[in-house]
Amino acid sequence: MARKRESSAFSVLFASRMIRITYLMALALILAFLLPTHLSASRIYTTKEHIFPEFIKWHVYVVNGLSNNQDLFTHCKSTENDLGIHNIQSGSNITWSFRTDFTHSTLFWCYVRKDHDASSFDVFWYYHPLFEKCNWKNCIWVAKDDGIYLKDLSKNVDELMHGWYSGM
């Protein structure tokens, strides 16, 4: 009878320790997966807006950076909004603000023309590298004599994105 009690006490103690070990292993496994993900995300995304771009109020600028006082004809739109036709004087810009939708389908594009050259391109779409270039808030497109540039605010450089096409 004493052996049975010993055996029973041992079983309870063994089962209790196994539960603790299993619990600790599960916790270690969870931490092993979550900690690197959290550290990686904290290096890239510093605020809830960076994790959820839907909360950001975005601003898009189309700037006339053409030389010789050339005007820039623009027509920008999305599937929901036609922003109208504008004739932008040299050194001026048009701008608009919006929030993205939760389906990640927000898209704006523009048709721009100078003299006999034109270009048509997307100015905003759901794409994290674009968000980084726009510093998670301001997408600045500049029409220059040799093409259309996106100002990469993270590197403080203008990046040639599109050329001009004759006869459009």
Image (cartoon, helix red, strand yellow):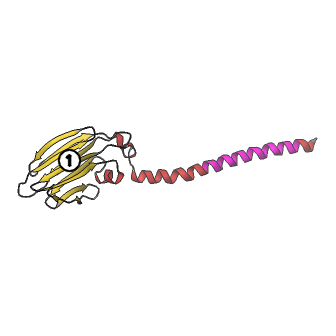
* Residue drawn at (65%, 50%) of the image: 25
Looking at the rendered image, the quarter that the C terminus falls into is: bottom left
Give the quadrant of the N terminus.
top right
Mark 1, secondary structure of its residue: strand
Count of labels in the image: 1
Residue receiving disc 1: 61
In the rendering, at what x and y percent does residue 129 appear? Answer: 34, 54
Is residue 16 magenta-colored?
yes
Residue 104, image x, y percentages:
37, 43
Judge from the rendering whether residue 135 lies leftward or rightward of residue 76; answer left or right: right
Give above or below for 99 relative to 147.
above
**What residue is drawn where x is 20% and y is 47%?**
61
Judge by depth and name the residue closer to the eye, 20 or 154.
154
Specify start and end residues of the magenta stretch as a single range: 5-27
Q: Residue furthest front?
A: 167
Residue at the outermost right position: 1
Q: Seen from this angle, which residue lies furthest bottom?
A: 146
